[in-house]
Amino acid sequence: MDQYPDIEKLKSIASQVRRDIVRMVHGAQSGHPGGSLGCTDFLVALYFHIMKHDKSFNSDAKNEDLFFLSNGHISPVWYSVLARSGYFDTKELATFRKLNTRLQGHPATEEGLPGIRIASGSLGQGLSAAIGAALTKKINNDSSTVYTLMGDGELQEGQVWEAAMFAASNKVDNLIAAVDYNGQQIDGPTSKVNDLGDLKAKWEAFGWTVIEANGNEMEDILSNIKLAKSLSKKEKPILILMKTEMGAGVDFMEGTHKWHGIAPNDDDLQKALAQLEETLGDY
């Protein structure tokens, strides 16, 4: 990890990733653009600056940082970031959700796609998997960090809170979890579907150190991930409560659950691409 990131370069990568997302979902006429766009800055920050990782992809990942995507329906952003960071050819992004593709709608291991260590998308499970990996690193005297991302609607799953309690009780302090706190889920605002209440207070009550961040400002997300790392290894797991806008970067997709799982039509695609600079070349 470089001490001084090139913020403009990271923003440039994020713009291309957002282009990839809307093009992938449009091409398949299926998928989840809203949350993918909202989490783009976080995934770009992790893979292009924060994490120590090897694109040659050894599943054991000794002395590497690990990332687990719990809310697997936002696979478009993860696939784009993996491809753009060299795990596989960007041309493969065109196969998203097509027959016989390795780029399933929810990440899966059966197809052997580099970068994917667990199948995900059955909500509530990612934190448990990340805790297992973090404990394994402790056993192996591996000082690397494990990261995971959850959706806020996903926090309505009971397994999340069992895992949260376990992590604090067992001092899993090489773990940094993040919550995509956009206030939206497939059926509407989280406040109306099943109100989450005071999430900061809840996670703190479960024994976690909580950091609040703006997930759509590259500088802010970088500084808060680095803060999280500085507070880790102190016998408490870390949570980044990351405020985002669903659909961030495309004005007509922002702030509504409508684009949680709906593909843009041809006109929508052109409107979206007009707002997103092509910086690395479209696949």
Image (spheres, grey):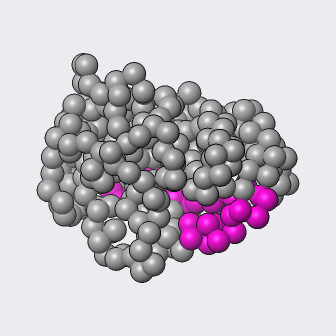
Residue that lies at the very extreme toward the bottom in this rendered image: 4
Q: In this view, does 59 lie above or below 172?
A: above
Start and end of the magenta stretch?
225-251
Residue that lies at the very extreme toward the front in this rendered image: 141
Q: Can residue 243 be seen in this view?
A: yes
* Residue visible at 51% across and 63% down in the picture: 215
Seen from the viewer's position, the closer of residues 268 and 163 is 163
Q: Position of residue 57 (x, y in %)?
A: 37, 42
Q: Is residue 216 above or below residue 126?
A: below
Q: Position of residue 223 (x, y in %)?
A: 54, 74
Q: Position of residue 194 (x, y in %)?
A: 70, 38
Seen from the viewer's position, the closer of residues 236 and 251 is 236
* Residue visible at 76% across and 46% down in the picture: 167
* Residue visible at 48% across and 45% down in the picture: 61
Residue 240 lies in the magenta-colored region: yes
Seen from the viewer's position, the closer of residues 29 and 202 is 202
Rendered image quadrant of residue 110: top left
Q: In this view, does 34 lie above or below 122?
A: below
Q: Is residue 34 visible?
A: no
Residue 170 lies in the magenta-colored region: no
Q: In this view, does 68 lie to the left or right of 281?
A: right
Residue that lies at the very extreme toward the top in this rendered image: 99
Q: In this view, does 78 lie above or below 240?
A: above
Seen from the viewer's position, the closer of residues 261 and 191 is 261
